[in-house]
Every structure is written in C-alpha cells, then in structure tokens.
Amino acid sequence: MKNYLKDKKIITNIEKLDKQHSILFKLIKKLKTILTIGEPDYAEMINVLAELNAYTNFHFKTEEAFFEEHGYKNLDLHRAKHQSFIEQVEAFSLENALGTPGLGEEMLEFLENWLIIHIQHLDVSACRQLNLTDKKDIGK
Ligand SMILES: [Fe+2]
Ligand SMILES: [Fe+2]
C-alpha cells in the first residue's frame, strides 16, 4: 500500500496520516473486490461499508486535531471538504450499487479519486505548509 501512495504522489510523510490513508484505500478496494466477484456477499458488504464509514470519521477527526494542534490556517475549509466526503460515503447505497450493473464500481471509483485528489491537494500541502514533512516523529 505504501507503493500505492507513492505512485499517486500522496505521501504526507506524517506516519500516522499515511497509515490511515492506506487503510481507507484498502477498505475501498475491499468493497470493490466484493462487488466485482460473481455473487457479491451482501452481509460482508454491509460490514465493510460500516467499517469505511467509521474509519473515515476517525481519520478526519485525527487529521483535523493534528492540523489544529500545529496551527494550520485553512482548517475550516478543510473540515468542510471532509464533511462532504462523509456525506458521499453515507450516500453510497448498497441497493443501488447491487441493482444497477457497473454503478457500484463507479461510485467506489469516485470515492477513491476524491480521496486521491484531496490528499494530493490539501493534506500534502497542509503538511508542507506547516513544515512538518521532515519531522516524522511528530506524527506518531
Ligand atoms: Fe487525510
Ligand atoms: Fe484531509
């Protein structure tokens, strides 16, 4: 997963944030895998989706507290972006995903791309602005 972050140029160099980002991508990929196998396991999808929901909230809270602690100036805007992602995840409907061929994959693709762009443009630049990129121990 570290290579995935590297490939997409979304490494913040804050260990705990990179770890949490990896877990978010893993959960999205897990959902994608369940959805694309022959007969998707509905119960498993519900579990993974609940996990994604909970972990998204947990990650955003951690990140916002971390930025606040280090005096990040654009926190309100950043928070609003997080909130809109939470709403997108909540709007993910299993019924729709399973009822319309291709729709679930498309929705997951959207979530994945949203996260990539968000991390690239906001998380990485926030860490850079705060000059936190070299101080790996700060993020632990
Ligand atoms: Fe993040
Ligand atoms: Fe963020």
Image: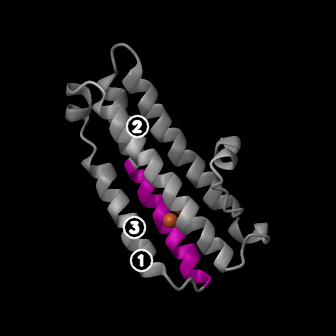
Residue 3 picture quarter: top right
| Quarter the C terminus occupies | bottom right
Kindly state the secondary structure of the residue where label 3 is placed: helix
Task: Report the label total.
Answer: 3
Residue topped by disc 3: 81
Nearest the eye: 121 or 97: 121
Q: Given contact means CB atoms under 8 Å apart, are the residues at marks 3 and 1 in contact?
A: yes
State which region is magenta.
Answer: 53-70
Query: Given this view, does label 3 or label 2 mark the residue nearer the observer?
Result: 3
Residue at label 1?
77
- Which residue is at the front of the view, 60 or 130? 130
Q: CA distance from mark 3 to mark 1?
A: 6 Å
Q: Earlier in the sequence, mark 3 or mark 2?
A: 2
- Where on the picture, by quarter, is residue 38? top left
The residue at the point 37 percent across, 58 percent down is: 85
Farthest residue, direction top: 38
Query: Residue 100: x and y, percent?
Result: 22, 27
**Is the residue marked by circle 1 packed among few (<14), some (14-19), or many (20+) residues within 10 Å?**
few
Q: Position of residue 43 (x, y in %)?
A: 31, 27
Whole-number angstrom distance, CA of label 1 to CA of label 2: 29 Å
Q: Is residue 117 above or below residue 36?
A: below
Whether disc 3's CB lies below 8 Å from ligand 2 is answered yes
Magenta stretch holds residue 60: yes
Quadrant of the image containing the N terminus? top right
* Residue at 39 percent of width and 39 percent of height: 108
Residue marked by disc 2: 48
Q: Nearer the viewer's eye, disc 1 or disc 2?
A: 1
The amino acid marked with disc number 3 is Lys
Position of residue 16 relative to residue 33, above or below, is below
At which x and y percent is residue 119? 55, 60
